[in-house]
Amino acid sequence: MPSIPYQFNSKGLTNTIDRLGVGSYLVKFPGIGVSGGMAHATAYGSTSESCKVQSWVPSGTLQRVWVKCFNSAGAPTDTRFVASFVRNVNSASPLAHLWADQPSVATYTPSPTYQFNSSGALSTITRSAVGHYNAILTNLAGTGGNVKVTAYGTGSETCKVQGWGPSGPNVRAIVKCFRTNGAPVDNRFTLTYAKNRGITGIPGTKAGYLLADQPANPSYTPLASHQFNFLGGLNTVTR
């Protein structure tokens, strides 16, 4: 059972984790089982391990999320991680998520079951090169916000966000996926975009985000357009 101060369940229940093997975990969120929704996982700690979502599926009222973790050589490894699952959330602020599950297709619309857009429209994916994707979040145009990307599947591939910004009436988020040797690779991924709220999109929760875009700067305040603090203050970064 993860530490209570470091977990949350909207039904007031307790989340648990089963270790299934080296680097293989089952995260169990009771009371919130539902088809669709969106899952993310990120490795935690000071070394170079990575984690990803293998899959997620409801079992009655239990939501099950499988997580796989790897070392820098691509071998399974035990490591700490953070994980989340969220259903579709009504939102007055821009919010979208999707599961990009057709990595070799040039252009497609992800399954409506596995995507959400607060504008009511459907988002799309365009593949521009091997491992290079544009997620078009329809009718959410505007600068700023925050993007979270997690690689999906059983292998050691990783995915990351290259950048995002307005594209006509839409937001375009650029995603790149790689093998452990750094070569581009076609891969599935999950993506969430949120503006002026936490990445789960749940209203009223304590939340903050920022884009740390000055990696060599000893100390700075990120752009106001690309950060958020529910108390209204400005977040900072120190190297």
Image (cartoon, rainbow, N blue to C red):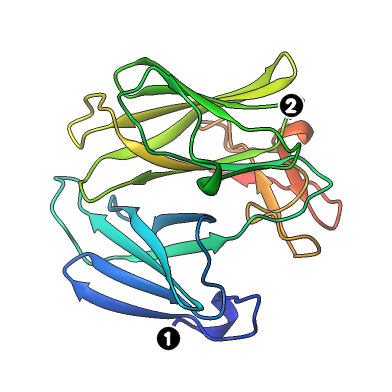
In the rendering, at what x and y percent does residue 189 appear?
40, 40
Amino acid at dot 1: Met
Residue on which disc 1 sits: 1
**For the residues marked 1 and 2, what is the alpha-carbon distance in whole angstroms?**
40 Å
The image quarter in which residue 70 lies: bottom left
Q: Nearer the viewer, residue 122 or 131?
A: 122
Residue 79 percent coordinates (x, y): 28, 65
Within 10 Å of disc 2 (Cα), the crowding (few <14, some 14-19, many 20+) is: many
Left or right: 75, with 85 as reference point: left
Question: Going by the image, does 88 lie left or right of 83?
Answer: right
* Residue drawn at the location 25% of the way across and 27% of the way down: 185
Q: Which residue is mark 2?
A: 139
Q: Residue 71 appears at what percent x and percent y?
A: 20, 52
Q: Residue at x 78, y 45 (%)?
A: 196
Label 1 sits on a secondary structure element that is loop
157 vs 36: above or below: above
